[in-house]
């Protein structure tokens, strides 16, 4: 019952999310998968570890596929290279059954997630203190184009 409620909440969160929030959700899911992989590795649960690593890898593939290299420029290229590096570390962790590559992936994903959390706050313009809208319940328009997004 509790899992069903969590799944429903997550589904609603994803369906109502803007592109920045979707990226944050994916980072959270990837972090959770790597944390699960580390727990399974420590407990000697090989199949579960492998599934968790595969889940993290799939999320990284989705993040890489979402990059718009034409509009994203150097940042998109660097993110693509980083995602590829993280994929390699996940593969290494799975093949060697070792924790250090997972710890490295977890650290890098956590740093990326922090960056996206800050970027999300900076994307939406904040009302000026002298503005008649300051302190109101009005929601500012997003600063990104509604027709698409790029990283």
Image (cartoon, rainbow, N blue to C red):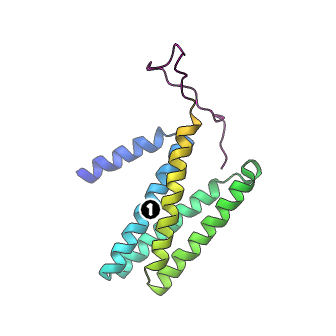
Range drawn in magenta: 126-151
Q: Position of residue 137 (x, y in %)?
A: 43, 20
Q: Which residue is mark 1?
A: 31
Q: Position of residue 151 (x, y in %)?
A: 65, 50
Q: Residue at horizontal 56%, vertical 33%?
A: 124
Q: Callout 1: helix, strand or loop?
A: helix
Residue 125 painted magenta? no
Q: Quadrant of residue 131?
A: top right
Q: Nearer the viewer, residue 101 or 2?
A: 101
Residue 139 drawn above or below residue 29: above
Direction top: furthest residue: 132
Q: Is residue 130 left or right of residue 51?
A: right
Q: Residue at horizontal 50%, vertical 54%?
A: 113
Q: Residue at horizontal 44%, vertical 84%?
A: 97
Q: Quadrant of residue 77?
A: bottom right
Q: Nearer the viewer, residue 28 or 61?
A: 28
Direction left: furthest residue: 1
């Amino acid at each position: 019952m509790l899992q069903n409620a969590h799944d429903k909440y997550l589904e609603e969160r994803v369906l109502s999310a803007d592109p920045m929030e979707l990226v944050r959700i994916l980072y959270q899911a990837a972090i959770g998968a790597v944390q699960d992989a580390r727990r399974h590795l420590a407990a000697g649960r090989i199949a579960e570890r492998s599934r968790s690593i595969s889940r993290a890898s799939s999320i990284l593939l989705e993040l890489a596929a979402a990059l718009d290299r034409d509009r994203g420029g150097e940042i998109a290229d660097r993110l693509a290279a980083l995602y590829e590096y993280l994929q390699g570390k996940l593969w290494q962790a799975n093949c060697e059954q070792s924790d250090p590559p997972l710890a490295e992936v977890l650290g890098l994903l956590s740093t990326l997630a922090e960056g996206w959390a800050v970027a999300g706050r900076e994307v939406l313009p904040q009302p000026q203190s002298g503005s008649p809208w300051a302190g109101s319940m009005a929601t500012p328009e997003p600063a990104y184009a509604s027709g698409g997004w790029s990283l």
